Image (cartoon, grey):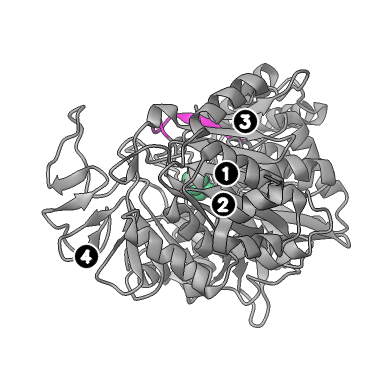
Amino acid sequence: MSDADFLKEKLGDSYGKLSALDNEKLNDFIEAFIKHCRPDSVFVCDNSDADHQYIRDTALELGEEKSLAMEGHTIHFDGYFDQARDKANTKYLIGKGVDLGELNCVDKEEGLAEVMGFLEGSMVGKQMIVAFFTLGPENSVFSQSCAQITDSYYVAHSETILYRPGYEQFKRLADKDDFFRFVHTAGELDGVVSKDVDKRRVFMDLADNIVFSTNTQYAGNTVGLKKLALRLAINKACKQDWLAEHMFIMGCHGKEGETTYFAGAFPSACGKTSTSMVRGETIVGDDIAYIRNVDGKCMAANVEKGIFGIIRDVNSKDDPVIYNAVTTPGEVIFSNILKTEDGKVFWLGKDGQCPKSGFNHSGDWTEGKKDGKDNEVTCSHKNARYTLAISELENQDEHWDDPAGVELGGIIYGGRDSDTTVPVEESFGWDHGIITKGASIESETTAATLGEEGVRKFNPMSNLDFVAVPIGSYIQANLDFGAKLAKKTKIFSVNYFLKDEDGDYLNGKEDKRVWLRWMEARVREEVDTIKTPTGYIPKYEDLKKLFAELLDFEYTLEDYNRQFTIRSLELLAKTSRIEVMYREKVPDTPKIVYDMLDEQRKRIEETREKHGDYILPDELAGE
Ligand code: SPV
Ligand code: MN
């Protein structure tokens, strides 16, 4: 049988949709995996309303999602042991002679044999879905075409919410081979959840721009266009002088009629989404940004069109916009929260009282339930999420879907740091910011990945999990990108997690609104600063004004001093930790990284000699 006849027979009604794309590379890819995964049938999605509706309906029909009382809302459950990204089993397939430094790698032949073994016959008794999307807006310098093969209607449904349709773009592909490929199987099912999580693998082949994902359903492991594509994009970006970053993009509106855009990188579950959604400002995207130099300007676009956000602690007080979106009719997929008999939902930190019983990721649930290890099973998982389109949000930025992207006024690096860095600080310049802010991020671990929580981990640009090239060359690519900008974007650090001696947070949840407006004022050159050994910090008067204006809060000098004390000893310790990390783990570290860390250490030591271990900002004013 010829290839065309094989596809015609196997695809049936869907054949016309594939052949209209007239792409042999694509046909070869699909044919190979039909032969290998052996689905009973194949559905090709052409992004029509009818096809999207079919995907929604089938997710319900197969039980991968269940409908809820609220119109448009559904709920999906991942297996009890499949609740987060599996870093240990996420690996790069590397051929002979390729060196990716410390990254988690597996020999290509060996890895392929394993994952292809898991894929073989994995779709017998199931339908294969083939769907097309674009990362970044269509028809823009940011567009990246993607083809997804999956046997999960939940994955396909999530992608129709989170990503822009790409079918039409495929018709116009100039280079027919220029698309990212994703192949996913949930594997054998136990009811509706993946049964063989011990065979969970996410293996990436950078040479062929393909990612394989098996025996898992959690979106961070399966939704190809999210973190799987980010890894392929970082590899591509490094070769082409642009950046693919784990960043939100948001618009700040401190000055009537004008918007200053920021992109911000924070490790998972450290306030990234809530920063992009703060009251009074507008959201472009909450997770992944592509950044390009367009005529000397630093332009950024959200590669997604939706949000896969953490639902824990989303309540009407702290996150009113999201709360409203997830408690009113509209298309929302919840995952791993509590569903009651009458189709209502509850999650950790939601407004109101938690029901005494219901159904969740552990099965039937009643208050006080324990798992096999005698740990309490909470009503929802800490990493439980909601999936919705940005178009559902009342705070969407008017340029969120602009093919030109938005011009960045500032880049922000954040982390979960209880004792070292001040709540907000501006770097001395691009290189200093990239090195001592971005490349020096350390963060205490969270529930967004499997493993122990609360351990301080090195996480350059919050992108460590996704950096697909040796880390030193990734940092060099960031430095080079800045060098070519006509106007350097300012770089800041923020830390929302500073604690006092008793372990209480030194900041309120809404303080980030003040830090954002202060950074905006810096971009506009409207406020002055105090120079510290590690960067420029705000002056008390400027913050006092912003706290009063934005939060109606009387910010005292004592508050300021507690938050902005320069902690010399902790800063020196951090500088040493970072240096050791690079020396031990990153053999291709650019020399400038060591030089800048060294200069920073000297500055901290000199200031410490003069002013002591803990220095109040006022002591440095005027220096
Ligand atoms: C993150 O963990 O950074 C997320 C969710 O944004 S995931 O899809 O799991 O990556
Ligand atoms: Mn993320």
SS for callout 1: helix
Q: Real-space Cα distance between discs 1 and 3? A: 66 Å
Specify few, some or many for label 3: CA neighbours under 10 Å numbering under 14, 14-19, or 20 or more: some
Q: Nearer the viewer, mark 2 or mark 3?
A: 2
**Do we see residue 281 in this rendering?**
yes
The numbered disc on residue 10 is 2
Is 263 situated left or right of 217 in this image? right
SS for callout 4: loop
Quadrant of the image for the N terminus? top right
Query: Of all residues shown, which one is farthest toward the bottom?
Result: 257
Residues 455 and 213: in front is 213
Q: Real-space Cα distance between discs 4 and 1? A: 39 Å
Residues 366 and 5: in front is 5
Q: Which residue is mark 1?
A: 34
Q: Which residue is mark 3?
A: 608
Specify few, some or many for label 4: CA neighbours under 10 Å numbering under 14, 14-19, or 20 or more: some
